[in-house]
Image (tube, helix red, strand yellow):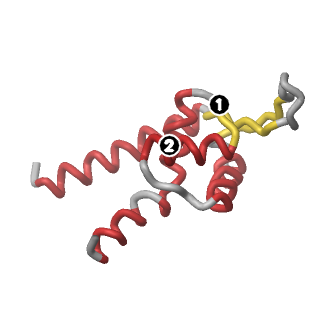
């Protein structure tokens, strides 16, 4: 693959990881490692583990997601589940609208 395409893919995946996280959290609450796995499965790229945690921390700090520890019923350690807030849902809508409008412009529509 050419260098420009690789750079484009990185820019619209790994560098805006927040939109993928918010999109998945719209479906249901998830813990960080589960989100990372779902991103790979759903969007076909794999963010760095540290990046996922950093983005989740920032989203939580800014009020786009909330986090809650949940005990496991199978005896495994508790996990921190992230949930989309109304503010996060609005950010997701705005982000998707921006991307859709940008693609329309690029297509000349």
| Quadrant in which the N terminus appears | bottom left
Give coordinates of residue 40: x percent, y percent.
50, 48
Mark 1 lies on residue: 29
| Alpha carbon distance from label 2 to label 1 | 17 Å
Mark 2, other Cα within 10 Å: few <14 / some 14–19 / many ≥20: some
* Residue closer to the observer: 45 or 98: 45
Mark 1, other Cα within 10 Å: few <14 / some 14–19 / many ≥20: some
Q: Earlier in the sequence, mark 2 or mark 1?
A: 1
Residue with the most extreme bottom position: 3
Name the element at disc 1. loop
Q: Which mark is residue 4?
A: none
Relative height, residue 3 to residue 32 (above, below):
below
Image point (72%, 50%), residue name: 61
Image point (89%, 29%), residue name: 75
* Residue closer to the observer: 14 or 66: 14
Q: Which mark is nearer the camera, 2 or 1?
A: 1
Q: 78 left or right of 20?
A: right
Image point (87%, 37%), residue name: 77
Q: Residue 9, located in which quarter of the rendered image?
A: bottom left
* Residue closer to the observer: 30 or 92: 30
Give coordinates of residue 17: x percent, y percent.
52, 54
Mark 2 lies on residue: 91
Give coordinates of residue 101: x percent, y percent.
25, 48
Give coordinates of residue 52: x percent, y percent.
63, 54
Q: Residue 51, located in which quarter of the rendered image?
A: bottom right
Name the element at disc 2. helix
* Residue closer to the observer: 92 or 8: 8
Relative height, residue 52 to residue 70 (above, below):
below
């Amino acid at each position: 693959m050419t260098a420009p395409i690789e750079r484009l893919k990185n820019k619209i995946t790994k560098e805006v990881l927040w939109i993928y996280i918010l999109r998945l959290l719209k479906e249901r609450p998830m813990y960080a490692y589960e989100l990372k796995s779902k991103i790979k499965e759903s969007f076909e790229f794999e963010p760095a583990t540290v990046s996922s945690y950093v983005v989740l921390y920032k989203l939580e700090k800014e009020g786009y997601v909330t986090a809650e520890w949940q005990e496991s019923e199978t005896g495994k350690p508790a996990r921190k589940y992230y949930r989309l807030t109304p503010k996060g849902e609005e950010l997701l809508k705005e982000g998707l609208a921006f991307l859709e409008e940008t693609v329309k412009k690029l297509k000349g529509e």
